[in-house]
Image: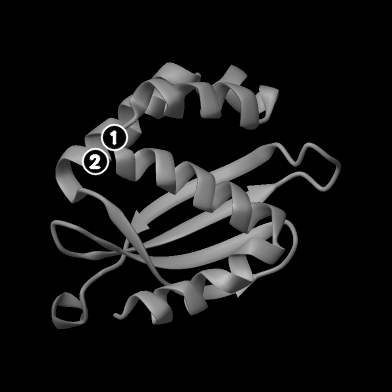
């Protein structure tokens, strides 16, 4: 995909609070800046979410994904509104993932849900 096409796919994300959080988190993840990613999680995730699963565990999951999948590239915005984003992303080491980001309506739009799920390749689906 050309750089221009990639920018076109990201444009809807910048109009959404959830999209902007997804861009910010993915940028830190792709840089491998895990110290800053931990800060991002601590500052931007909902306190109740962090009470259930702490920043350290969430960061460890992202590190494991980084080792297995590599960097993530936004391929297509599947669905979006101000507080929800569903995005198809490709992985550096192969495979496609569905990324979902949901944020709270009131400012500062804390992250309520983040899911990165591998998509089943067409050839293995029954």
| As drawn, 82 above or below 8 | above
In the rendered image, residue 110, in percent from the top left (x then y), is placed at 70, 36
In the rendered image, residue 1, in percent from the top left (x then y), is placed at 29, 80
Quadrant assignment, res 80: bottom right
In the rendered image, residue 49, in percent from the top left (x then y), is placed at 61, 28
Q: Secondary structure at mark 2?
A: helix
Give the numbered dot on residue 47: none
Residue that sits furthest to the front in the current view: 4
What residue does disc 2 label? Answer: 66
Q: Secondary structure at mark 1?
A: loop
In the rendered image, residue 17, in percent from the top left (x then y), is placed at 70, 53
Precedes in sequence: disc 2 or disc 1: 1
Image quadrant occupied by the C terminus: bottom left
| As drawn, 19 above or below 39 | below
Q: Residue at x 47, y 73 (%)?
A: 7
**Foreground pick, 123 / 8:** 8
Quadrant assignment, res 15: bottom right
Mark 1 closeness class: few <14, some 14–19, many ≥20 residues within 10 Å: some
| Image-based side of 86 in relation to 119, left or right | right
| As drawn, 84 above or below 2 | above
Give the numbered dot on residue 32: 1
Q: Residue at x 86, y 42 (%)?
A: 106
Q: Residue at x 41, y 17 (%)?
A: 56
């Amino acid at each position: 995909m050309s750089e221009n096409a990639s920018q076109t796919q990201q444009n809807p994300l910048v109009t959404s609070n959830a999209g902007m959080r997804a861009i910010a988190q993915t940028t830190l993840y792709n840089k491998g800046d895990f110290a800053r990613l931990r800060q991002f999680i601590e500052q931007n995730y909902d306190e109740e979410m962090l009470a259930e699963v702490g920043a350290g565990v969430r960061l460890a999951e992202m590190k494991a994904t980084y080792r297995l999948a590599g960097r993530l590239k936004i391929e297509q915005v599947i669905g979006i509104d101000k507080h929800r984003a569903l995005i198809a992303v490709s992985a550096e080491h192969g495979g496609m993932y569905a990324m979902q980001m949901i944020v709270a309506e009131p400012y500062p739009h804390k992250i309520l849900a983040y899911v990165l799920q591998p998509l089943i390749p067409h050839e293995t689906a029954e």
